[in-house]
């Protein structure tokens, strides 16, 4: 699927969500390639949540993420005091929520976060596997 179609599907998903809420069914997505090594999904979500809540403390918030957080993201999760992290598939190389290490519940840190793992695990793993298979062998789809 082309990138334009992917992003338009997301806009359509948002339009459907608006319609279900009896709002005008228009969806919009703004996309910008950041080329930023720290712009992981969790980091962007935490920044957006802080702005929405108006506080850096997210003590009554839960974070849902398709892949287990890495050490950088786990550190940000702890520092923002997220109540609970729910993730889909494990990260066997750098998982910091119990697979390789558990920074989210490390006793020396000022906050520990509850962890729920394996939610929709197969679906979360499949999207990553498909992405990396395509990246490593781009001509396989032709």
Image (cartoon, rainbow, N blue to C red):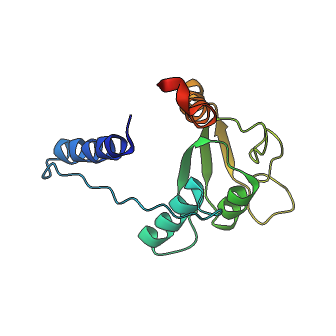
Q: Residue furthest right?
A: 108
Q: Is residue 34 above or below residue 94?
A: below
Q: Nearest the camera: 112 or 79?
A: 79
Say above or below: 97 vs 106: above
* Residue drawn 77% across the image and 66% down it: 110
Image x and y of residue 127, in percent: 53, 32
Q: Where in the figure is residue 66, as x and y percent of width and height?
A: 56, 40
Can the viewer see residue 123?
no
Total marks drawn? 0
Q: Is residue 6 above or below residue 76?
A: above
The location of residue 90, given as percent across then percent down, is 70, 35
Q: Locate the N terminus and report the quarter of the image it occupies.
A: top left
State the residue in front, 17 or 92: 92
Residue 59 x/y as whole percent: 58, 62
Residue that appears at 61% across and 35% down:
132
Q: Residue at x 45, y 72 (%)?
A: 51
Please give left or right for residue 125 compared with residue 113 in the image.
left
User: Image check: 134 left or right of 105?
Assistant: left
Instruction: Decide if residue 67 is in sight here.
Output: yes
């Amino acid at each position: 699927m082309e990138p334009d179609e992917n992003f338009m599907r997301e806009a359509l998903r948002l339009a459907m969500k608006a319609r279900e809420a009896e709002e005008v069914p228009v969806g919009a997505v703004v996309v910008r390639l950041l080329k930023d090594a720290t712009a992981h999904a969790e980091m962007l979500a935490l920044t957006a949540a802080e702005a929405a809540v108006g506080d850096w403390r997210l003590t009554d918030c839960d974070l849902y993420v398709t892949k287990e957080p890495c050490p950088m993201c786990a550190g940000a999760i702890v520092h923002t005091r997220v109540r609970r992290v729910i993730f889909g598939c494990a990260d066997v190389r750098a998982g910091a929520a119990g697979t390789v290490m558990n920074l989210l519940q490390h006793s020396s840190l000022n906050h520990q976060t509850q962890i729920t793992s394996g939610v929709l695990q197969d679906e979360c793993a499949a999207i990553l596997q498909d992405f990396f298979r395509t990246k490593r062998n781009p001509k396989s789809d032709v």
